[in-house]
Image (cartoon, grey):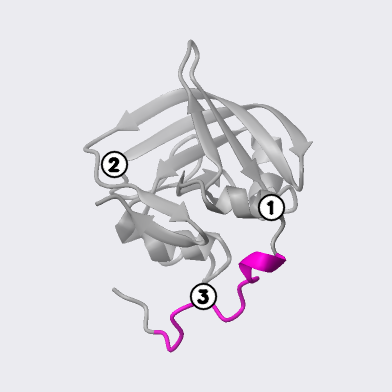
Amino acid sequence: MVPVTIHSTDPFATPDEDKSPVRRLRGRLAAPVTLWTAPGPAGLTVSSTVVADGDPGRVLGLIDDESEFWDALEPSGRFALTALTPADRQLADRFAGLMPAPGGLFAADEWLDTEYGPVPSGARTWAGCRLESSRVVGWALLVEAVIEKVEAGPSPAPLIHYRGRYTELR
């Protein structure tokens, strides 16, 4: 489904010349779009995610420490990370707070309950993670977690965030 719009650009977006140089740099780095969900349930779209291989593997991400997701993650100590695809744009927008969620964030889709948090039914690639540490970095909370479980199915094209918009690999 292609969104209908009368503008070719976001009329509410901050013009490039008014953004800080760091924000402009960040916007020029492509990032995978992921969904992080915790028992509760609560969830958040996260595009600042890094996976570090090792024994054990780890995931690092920048999240909003005032989000409902953090409020659920902190006491539970675990979350599920789902790699999103171009078909998941509306899901990503909903969990980013950019799209209405009548009935709540989890009402519109089917979910698989896991010990780490809900995972969208049909998700091909997801990981179960255990919170290890967090600290404030800039205006975000840097979360470091140990990857305890990986489900890596077929590899469709990822959903990418670049210069304030979703895109996909071609």
Identify the image quadrant of the N terminus.
Answer: bottom left
Relative to residue 153, is residue 118 drawn left or right?
Answer: right
Element on which disc 1 rests: helix
Q: What residue is at 50 percent from the left and 58 percent from the top?
A: 163
Main SS class of the magenta portion in the image: loop
Relative to residue 146, is residue 142 drawn left or right?
Answer: right
- Highlighted range, magenta: 5-18
Q: Is residue 56 above or below residue 94?
A: above
Q: Position of residue 113 (x, y in %)?
A: 42, 44
> Can you see residue 110?
no
| Residue 21's disc number | 1
Q: Position of residue 72 (x, y in %)?
A: 66, 45
Element on which disc 2 rests: loop
Q: Position of residue 112 (x, y in %)?
A: 38, 46
Disc 3 marks which amino acid? Answer: Pro
Q: What residue is at 48 percent from the left and 19 percent from the top?
A: 57
| Residue 92's disc number | none
Relative to residue 158, is residue 81 drawn left or right?
Answer: right
For disc 1, the neighbor class at 10 Å (few under 14, some 14 to 19, many from 20) is few
Disc 2 marks which amino acid? Answer: Arg
Q: Is residue 32 above or below residue 18?
A: above
| Residue 102's disc number | 3
**Mark 2 highlights which residue?**
124
Disc 1 marks which amino acid? Answer: Pro
Instruction: Examine the image and state in which quarter residue 133 appears.
Output: top right
Choose mark 2 or mark 1, whichever is in front: 1
Element on which disc 3 rests: loop
Q: Disc 2 versus disc 1: distance between alpha carbons?
A: 36 Å
